[in-house]
Image: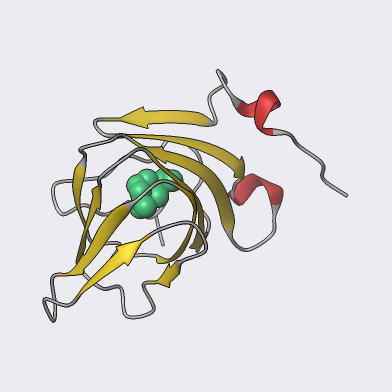
Amino acid sequence: MIVRTLQEVVGTDDDVSAPGWNSRRLLLAKHGMGFSMHDTLIEAGAELDLWYKNHLEAVYCIEGEGELESRVTGQKWPIAPGTIYALNENDKHTLRATTQLRMVCTFNPPVTGREVHDADGAYALPDGE
Ligand code: 9YT
């Protein structure tokens, strides 16, 4: 059994920041679950162009207000507490935070630790995958 708290993760190597966001990585590849789970804060005013071409990601909003736009179809959705979106087709998308967003993010395959976005808005896979 694995039990961790947000408090234990904050300020460690599993607490990763990049422009516009801060991801507290609660479960990672090293935990052997087959997915990772993050408690992520997106800064108010941030606009993130993302394309997780190597991962499937689901994102559940628990705090804040924002907007999600598909860069495939142009469709837009409001993001608010209680809304989940799943990038089941590795969809290119833009996430806009009107206020600070707090999101529970899960990745399959799991993120290994320190990943930040590349120029496409993707996370690389570990070498050899
Ligand atoms: C919602 C989203 O993709 N935000 C960027 C950070 C990422 N989800 C993470 O690593 O927690």
Image point (69%, 55%), residue name: 32
Image point (21%, 52%), residue name: 121
The answer to whether residue 4 is above or below residue 126 is above
Return the x and y of residue 127 as percentages of the image width and height.
39, 51
Apparent side of residue 13 relative to residue 17 in the rendered image (left or right): right
Image point (31%, 40%), residue name: 99
Apparent side of residue 86 relative to residue 93 in the rendered image (left or right): right
Q: Which residue sits furthest right?
A: 1
Image point (32%, 80%), residue name: 89
The answer to whether residue 78 is above or below residue 40 is below
Choose between 115 and 105: the one closer to the eye.
105
Residue 72 quadrant: bottom left
Residue 127 seen in the figure: no
Return the x and y of residue 126 as percentages of the image width and height.
42, 51
Tell me which colouring the rendered structure shows.
secondary structure
Residue 98 seen in the figure: yes
Choose between 125 and 39: the one closer to the eye.
39
The answer to whether residue 16 is above or below residue 88 is above
The answer to whether residue 100 is above or below residue 77 is above
Tell me the quarter of the image containing the C terminus: bottom left
The total number of labels drawn is 0
Return the x and y of residue 76 as percentages of the image width and height.
20, 71
